[in-house]
Image (cartoon, rainbow, N blue to C red):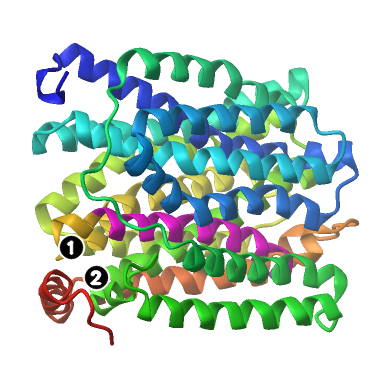
Amino acid sequence: MRTAEFSDRHKAAVLATCCLTVLITGMDLTIANLAIPSIRADLAATAAHAQWVIAIYALGVASLQLLGGAAGDRFGRRRVLQIGTAIFMLGSLLCSLAPDINVLIAARAVQALGASMMNPVALAVISQVFVAPVERARAIGIWGSVFGASLALGPVVGGLLIDVLGWRSVFWINLPVGAVAIALCAALVPESRSTTIRGIDPVGQALAAGSLFGLVFVLIESPGRGWTHPWIIATAVAAALGFVCFLLYEWWHADPFLELRFFRSIPFASAALTALFVFIVWGAFLFMMSIYLQGWRGYPAVQAGLLLLPVGLAVLVFSPISGRVVGRVGSRPALVVAGLMIVAMSTMLIFLTPMAPRWLLMMIFVSFGITFGMVTVPINYAAVSGMPQERAGAAAGVTSTSKQVGISLGVALSGVLAAGALSPPMGDFTSAADPLWLFTLVLGLAIAAMGIVSTSPRAARSAERLAPLIESAQSTRW
């Protein structure tokens, strides 16, 4: 059956099936952070181990999601979506059974492999089923709202599970939801493939993943091993060389993993950097606040989850507001507001005291949620601004990858800039974390500045000049 022949009810059922996949991957972001203090206590994990539990997941998704999307285009989107969900479930089961911290980190990498197939392929399925531009936009908006809802549900559900059943139970919830998603996918989702298959550039992806992993390894391991440790120096050199080789290889490759010419568009380059900066803040904030609420303040997991609830609720409320703002007046107001909210949040965190009142914590968490509610739509809008239609997906994929890279770097930088807050005895957690919040404040200012630069007439002209270059001169390089 062609997608045009689907009834509205069938389309809604397909959308609901795809939303189940983003629900469990979205909840996993906040649930895993909330479980970190319990995992450290139960598995005798160091601060570096705790960082790897979060960072390895984001690294895996960042490295593999473009490959996952390409696999769906080549081998069938329904098939790859089912396989990805099954792998994610397997990783979740292995996480719940992990006997030590190293096995848990490896199991999180398995989860990442599955998640790298789920979200990009689910979004491609939605785009295939909802053909009309208006209904497609509405469906993608609902899909994005479910992600916001998952962020709101994650802390509450995770906190309750941790307090009642222990940290291992936060991974159990993925099993029944994943099983339902696989069954519904088999019954409802049409199989589809892309009519034009692009290459997957395995060398470029391997170079990118290796240099990124090396950078995160240096940031996470250097506080414990020392910056002059042979492993740290060797890894830093290898990561730098790998990144240079990656840029050179992609420049000359006929069908590159990352089209470097995209960065000649100021809106696109700003969108990629904004996504990176925003999600560095995201990764650092959630990681540090979970430790602060449970490790320093002594809140049980369920209470810490309730305190984090305003984050998800604010994302859920302000995402559609941001969409309307961007539709009416463009991206600049939303981006500038998001940057200034990060500045306000970081300032409050710098002056945070060990026993700060709950109303101040609520203000911080609401500011954090508003930031992410306001910024997602303009990032995606700017990324595809001026791009040819057939390359819009690739451009959006780059910004999506920037988000995952940002999360992993945010967690890694927490150990570098706030090491005293992570290693027992923690002493004054709030003072030890001040360098990290000063860094996020600077990122907020940079985001607000890019919101202005990326929406200037000069930026619009750069995007206009890029499109014909990509369409008519695929072999052109800088």
Q: Position of residue 99 (x, y in %)?
A: 87, 34
Write down the quadrant of residue 172 in the picture.
top right
| Membership of 411 in magenta stretch | yes
Q: Does the magenta stretch mainly form a helix, a strand or a loop?
A: helix
Which amino acid lies under the numbered mark 2 shown in the image of this protein? Pro
Q: Determine which residue is flagged by label 2.
A: 267
Label 1, label 2: how far apart the Cα atoms are: 7 Å
> Is residue 152 visible in the rendered structure shown here?
no
Numbered range of the magenta stretch: 393-417
Give left or right: position of 160 versus 310: right
Name the residue: 71% across, 39% down. Answer: 107
Q: Label 2's element? A: helix
Name the residue: 21% across, 44% down. Answer: 195
Q: Label 1's element? A: loop
| Membership of 475 in magenta stretch | no
Work out whether residue 472 or residue 48 is closer to the camera in this orientation and state it: 472
Q: Earlier in the sequence, mark 1 or mark 2?
A: 2
Q: Position of residue 117 (x, y in %)?
A: 46, 40
| Mark number displayed over residue 438 | none
Work out whether residue 159 or residue 337 is closer to the camera in this orientation and state it: 159
Q: Determine which residue is flagged by label 1.
A: 385
